[in-house]
Amino acid sequence: MPRCHGWQGAAKGGNIMLGVIRKFFQFAGPRRGRMQLGIVFAFIHSIFHAMQILAIFVVLKALVEGQVSSATAWSSFGIMLVSMLGCIWTRHRSTMAEAEGSFYLCADKRTEIGDRMKYMPMGYFNDNSLGTITAAVTSTMEDLQDIAPRVMDKTVHGYIYAAVVTLMLIFFDWRIGFIVVAGILLFIGVNALMQKKSRRVSPARVAAQASLVGAVLEYAQGMSVVRAFNLADNAHKTMDRAIDECEKQNVGLEIAFIPFMFLQSLILKGMSVVLVAAAVWLYLAGAMELSVCLLVVVSSFIIYSQLETAGSMSALLRVIDLSMDRVEEIRRTPLMDERGKHIVPTGWGIEGSGVSFSYGERKIIDDVSFVIPAGTTTAVIGPSGGGKTTLCNLMARFWDVDRGSITLGGRDVRDYTLDSLLQNFSMVFQNVYLFNDTIANNIKFGKPGAGLAEIRAAAQKACCDDFIMLLPDGYDTVIGEGGATISGGEKQRIAIARAILKDAPIIILDEATANVDPENENQLQAAIAELTRSKTVIMIAHRLKTVRHADQILVLDGGKIIQRGTHEQLMAEGGMYADFIGMREKSIGWKLDGNARAAG
Ligand SMILES: Nc1ncnc2c1ncn2[C@@H]1O[C@H](COP(=O)(O)OP(=O)(O)OP(=O)(O)O)[C@@H](O)[C@H]1O
């Protein structure tokens, strides 16, 4: 049996409901006005709706007093007409205001989240899966956009309608009014228990929904691997599990609420019967007029009807509450450059001093210092997993160092706003990501205001104009998400065109290791030569030629720079660099031998 009773339970239930409504208005920010307007119209709607009881009373009173005339019919009709027209008008206004408010509210929040993500620490993306982040702007927002206004509207309308009807009945007979209030309090008590239950079961439903979004995303993204390894059954299983879990949680949520819904309904129907019995008893005892008694009998089942709808909807208040928390959590994640200043660096040299960095507990960069003079090329080499990419990412402040500092033009990179820091960098990664947009827009990403002539000039320098012009729509060809519709080499050259167009003074380049065919290889090298001309270049180098010609080579192993210098110096020194060169030379030799054999 319920542990919280009567007033206590009712107060708790009311608090939960009011708490969520208040929180929703705060959450709505500048869209609060529209949402509040919707609630005001829902309030007026309740008054118009309750007027129908008055129309019934006019007829009943005339009938009882034997004074039915055309005036009675007209009065009752007039009240009904005002009530109906008022209901239609206020319902339209409240629905419009709430739908408009929630639509723009969610649009604002989605845009805000998108903007904030650019400035969030990368650690956030490590700690939160793609599915969780996607769910926050898709299914969670849909809950807020679709469910929240309906729940708010029905809940507010239900309670206000009950309150207005109660006031009217108190006006006719205070004892009947008292019974109605008792019924409402009992209802709120049970509703409080349902809210408590909802508090326990709703988080699992929200989490299951996020997992399902994640599973679908992973399934779609990993489709090529799934096919290559014939893993369709396995991949299906993961998604099927997520669908089953989502279904289980949604059905579970509904089932968990059934006893409470039933109890709520039982209380309201039971109280309606009590109302009829009380009215008849009072009339028979001579303590109530017949017209009032008939009014109570006729309207007893209307009084609580809206409250019952409110009760079933309010089960979803917790889902709204959780959805708001989820969005707020993203909005509260501290941005990287909250205290940064817009700085224009006086030079393009980069210096690291005593830099240490860990992903979680795993130390990747360990007390590293380096100087990269402006206008020079630095090659970073070392075994896979040695921390080369991480070190480059620290320079562009994708992550913050744990200890030590990195400066650009003599200023700590943490002093800059991210925008003013990153406008100095162009980065070309090995895994190029192209957006599902036209080629022109993908290149323009490096300089949003660029015209077609500029875009083409950059593409020509990056040796990709020829192949773009052969495509059916040229620069207006839309490439699939991630650049799925063009080859690896072509993608890389588009990324280089993007970087050439940006024309930043510092270039961070992860050289391609993948086997590129000789024609592509030559074009790629020509594109890189264009991109890096008279810039400060940091290159994660895999090719002998690049390494040989670098002004400085940093050999990174186990998070430490174990060797540094020019090719000649390091060759003379021996050690890991000389071994690396030896291995590369051998691999080229092997390839030549292979070719020779193939030719022979
Ligand atoms: N976002 C991340 N979160 C956690 N660990 C990471 C992350 N990125 C890289 N690592 C780990 O840090 C280590 C160094 O990775 P990093 O990519 O910097 O090495 P690398 O020298 O560039 O390797 P490669 O030559 O194979 O690209 C690796 O063990 C890698 O698994």
Image: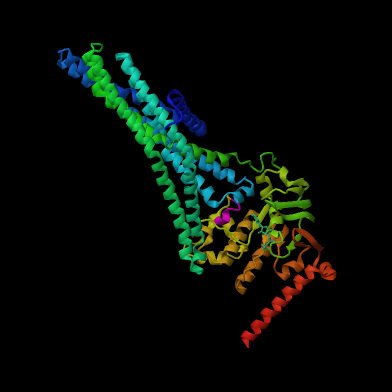
Give yes or no for residue 361 being in the magenta stretch. Answer: no
- Give the quadrant of the C terminus: bottom right
Q: Residue at x 46, y 54 (%)?
A: 242
13 or 409: nearer the eye? 13
Q: Does residue 86 appear in this view?
A: no
- Vertical side of 328 occupied by 234: above or below: below
- Furthest residue in direction front, as rendered: 1
Residue drawn at (40%, 39%) of the image: 257
Tell me where residue 548 appears, x and y as whole percent: 76, 68
Query: Colour scheme in the image?
Result: rainbow
Q: Is residue 535 above or below residue 301?
A: below
Q: Residue furthest bottom?
A: 600
Q: Would residue 498 appear left or right of 585 to someone viewing this image?
A: left
Residue 466, picture quadrant = bottom right
Q: Quadrant of residue 5?
A: top left
Name the spot of residue 344 as percent of width and height, x first: 72, 45
User: Residue 14, located in which quarter of the rendered image?
Assistant: top left
At horizontal 50% and vertical 67% (from top left) the residue drawn is 470
Please state if 43 lies on the left or on the right of 478 as rendered.
left
Residue 65 in view (yes/no) = yes
Vertical relation: 92 (above or below) 539: above
Height in image: 190 above or below 417? above
* Number of numbered discs overlaid on the protein picture: 0
The x, y position of residue 411, in whole percent, is: 76, 45
Quadrant position of the N terminus in the picture: top left
Task: Provide residue 371's location: percent of width, then percent of height.
Answer: 80, 55
- Ligand 1 resides in the quarter of the picture at bottom right
In the image, the segment drawn in magenta is 442-447
**Left or right placement of residue 586 versus residue 501 in this view:** right
